[in-house]
Image (cartoon, grey):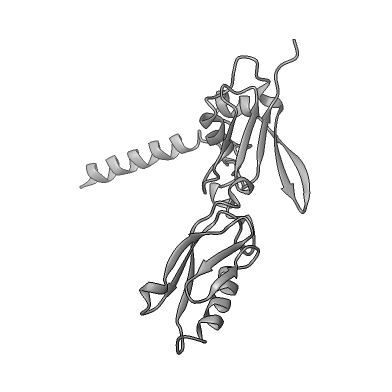
Amino acid sequence: MNRILKLISFVLVMLTAGCSNLPDSVTYGPEVSQNKRLLVDQYYIGVDDEVAINVWKHPDLSITVPVRPDGKISVPLVGEVLAGGKTPVEVDEEVTKKLTRYIRDPQVSVILVELRSHEFLSRVRVTGAVRNPRSLNFRQGMTVLDIVLEAGGLNEFASANNSKLFRVIKGKVEPINIYLFDILNDGDMKTNIAIEPGDILSIPERVF
């Protein structure tokens, strides 16, 4: 029993000694979970968005249609309804109001099937000294490193540590310094920040 206790004590001493060689604190870059900012507070239907109008117990009145260039959609019995520039709730209320002329207590739901009108507002871009400059669909969890890899990585002319991320903050475009050389070569992730919709990462070329 004493031998077992001595062995356990020895292992604990060795673990403590090993831990003493670790740095007191480790600093990580911003958490990926920080990019939860919404692009818009309220979504307004736009041209080319696809809208599904469902009328409960009336499948013949339920349709799925794209919003026309004039911002309108055509609904059976109701006729033309202006959807562009309105929220799904507002379209729901208008269709419901007009259907009450023909149906008692209509139960209507308006669902956005495809969001096409706002596609480019949410995109992120990678420009400059990368192998394949890209415009990418924003995805939750994206970081600077992710979009650089999506662009095929840096080319041989990149001045990596002079990179900048341009972001709209309080209505103004602000540059954020990004140290890509440190990220890619030293594993220093301090500036591997979470990407937000509309961000533009610019990597300049070296001056020879």
Pick the residue in front: 89 or 135: 89
Question: Along the horizontal axis of the image, is 70 left or right of 140?
Answer: right
Q: Percent from the top left, x then y, of residue 152? A: 52, 25
Name the one closer to the observer, 197 or 48: 48
Q: Is residue 113 left or right of residue 203?
A: left
Image position of 154 with respect to 59: above or below: above
Residue occupying image coordinates x 58% and y 55%: 36
Q: Residue at x 48, y 60 (%)?
A: 65
On screen, 19 above or below 70?
above
Q: Nearer the viewer, residue 178 or 90?
A: 90
Spot occupied by residue 72 in the image (x, y as percentages of width and height)? 60, 64
The percent coordinates of residue 117 (x first, y second) are 59, 52
- The image quadrant that residue 173 belongs to is top right
Q: Looking at the image, is 45 positioned above or below residue 13?
A: below
Q: Quadrant of the C terminus?
A: top right
Asked if residue 40 is positioned above or below residue 74 in the image, the reply reads above
Residue drawn at x 63%, y 67% as measured from the top left = 86
- Can you tell which quarter of the image residue 39 is in? bottom right
Relative horizontal placement of residue 147, taking residue 8 as reference (left or right): right
Q: Name the residue furthest left.
A: 1
Which residue is at the front of the view, 64 or 127? 64
